[in-house]
Image (cartoon, rainbow, N blue to C red):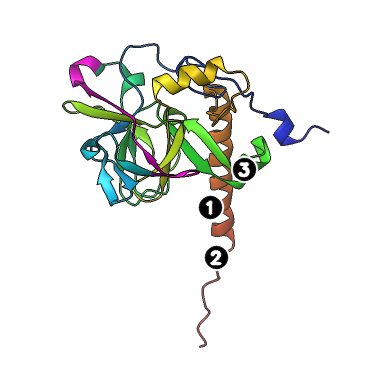
Amino acid sequence: MMKLGQLFAKDRTADIFGRSSTWDGSLSGSNVQANGFCAGTKLATNLGWRNVESLRLGDLVLTFDDGVQKITRIDRTVITDHQLGQALQDWPLHIPKGALGNHDEMTLMPEQAVMIESDLGEAMFGDPFTLVPACALIGYKGIERIKPRGAIDVISIHFDSEQIVFANVGALFHCLPAEGDLVADLANESAALGYDVLSMAQATDFVTAMRTDANQDAAWMNDTRLPTAIHAV
């Protein structure tokens, strides 16, 4: 019998945007920047938690696998509410407190890759750490699209290689590599591929399974509540 890890195996590929993954690149199709950090997001650095918009080239950011790493490129885009208009697929996401391990509520761009740690990821993909596009998480733990009010300041930070960074204390997010290094890596067939971001189809299956597990856990907790004490007459 085929195991879950074989059934949902991730293909290790890389596209021109540096997503070394099964990402299918068909989430939006618009020209609006859909990944990166919204201003106000706090990242872990060698100097403590700092707002992403305050970071500069050369600053050191704490990464998941490689300790502190130097920022080698920063992209900053201001997206107006007029640009987003009625394009629902481009709207940012509201992340409630605790939904992704974040200590405070967050605003997240829809195609920003999020790392989820779970036993389910281990069972389905052979890895407890799973990267999914944020928009696949809509409906999970109260995550929803929000209509922007005013402009959104979006900042993307890059390192010499792709990295996972810590945001708002407990959340984990993927950062693409600097462009020059990406081109070199893709040209070098022997270069080790980095993190896998699930395609939208795989991510949807994964999040659906997580929601099912969460509902089952809630039902189990409800069924196993201690009975109300019976007072003696």
* Magenta part of the chain: 62-83
Is 177 left or right of 222, judged from the image as shown?
left
| Residue type at the position of mark 3 | Leu
Crowd band around label 2 with a 10 angstrom C-alpha radius: few (<14), some (14–19), many (20+): few
Q: Residue at x 25, y 18 (%)?
A: 84
Separation of residues labelled 3 and 1 (CA atoms): 17 Å
Which numbered disc covers residue 225?
2
Mark 2 or mark 1, earlier in chain: 1
Mark 3 or mark 1, earlier in chain: 3
28 is higher (above) or lower (below) than 10: above
Q: Marks 3 and 2: which is nearer the front? A: 3
Mark 3 or mark 2, earlier in chain: 3
**Marks 3 and 2 close (CB-CB < 8 Å):** no
Quadrant containing the N terminus in the rendered view = top right
Q: Marks 2 and 1: which is nearer the front? A: 1
Which numbered disc covers residue 2?
none
| Residue type at the position of mark 2 | Arg
Q: Give the residue pinned by disc 3.
A: 120
Quadrant of the rendered structure where residue 153 is? top left
Quadrant of the rendered structure where residue 221 is? bottom right
Q: Give the residue pinned by disc 1.
A: 218
Helix, strand or loop status at disc 2: loop
Separation of residues labelled 3 and 2 (CA atoms): 25 Å
